[in-house]
Image (cartoon, rainbow, N blue to C red):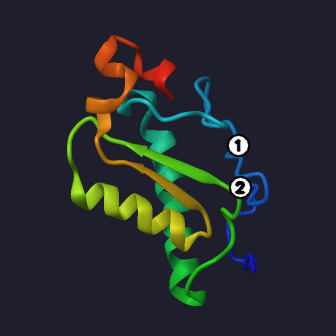
Amino acid sequence: MHPKTLNPLFDYKTMKIPTINSNGLTQTDILSVSQFNPDNLTTIFSRAREMREMVQRVGGTDLLKGKVLACLFYEPSTRTSASFIAAMERLGGSVIPITQGVQFSSVSKGETLADTI
């Protein structure tokens, strides 16, 4: 179910993005926008465009089957949360929505975000 028109540099089976700079993106948790530079963002937006086109062509995929996304937001964000959930589900993954965010996490007790994740 993986169209041949997708980028050959991206390993869709392991979901690994090739390292494109010294920071790299391979298997990286996203904790802050400061992790990204213009090259990273160009790569990410290119992949997002490919995924959107694939979903539009075939209605969905099992590309992320078996993968789980935990959505934790410091502030309420209906549109962002809904778009993350929709994208993950359209790509075959599942979502753990943490709707109370920081209020009920260990972050409220002084734990760092990295430790919470």
Give the image quarter of residue 84: bottom left
Indicate the quadrant where residue 5 lies. Answer: bottom right
Percent position (x, y) of residue 77?
22, 51
Q: Which mark is residue 18?
A: 1
Residues under numbered marks 1 and 2 in contact, where contact means CB atoms less than 8 Å apart: yes
Q: Is residue 96 above or below residue 18?
A: below
Residue occupying image coordinates x 29% and y 20%: 108
Q: Secondary structure at mark 2?
A: loop
Q: Quadrant of residue 86?
A: bottom left
Foreground of the two, 26 or 114: 114
Where does residue 101 sit, x and y in percent of width and height?
A: 31, 38
Q: Nearer the viewer, residue 27 or 18?
A: 27
* CA separation in Å, label 1 and label 2: 7 Å
**Vertical relation: 51 (above or below) 22:** below
Say which mark, if any, is on residue 10. 2
Q: Earlier in the sequence, mark 1 or mark 2?
A: 2
Within 10 angstroms of label 2, few (less than 14), some, or many (20 or more) residues?
Answer: some
Under mark 2, the amino acid is Phe
Where's residue 56, x and y in %? 50, 85
Residue lying furthest front: 104
| Side (left or right) of 91 relative to 82 | right
Identify the residue at horizontal 62%, vertical 31% (top origin).
Answer: 24
114 on left or right of 102:
right
- 112 displayed left or right of 68: left
Q: Is residue 117 above or below residue 95?
A: above
**Residue closest to the eye, 27 or 109:** 109
Q: Secondary structure at mark 1?
A: loop
Q: Amino acid at mark 1?
A: Pro
Question: Where's the N terminus, which quadrant?
Answer: bottom right
Residue appearing at x 72%, y 79% in the figure: 3
Q: Taking 12 as reference, is 73 left or right?
A: left
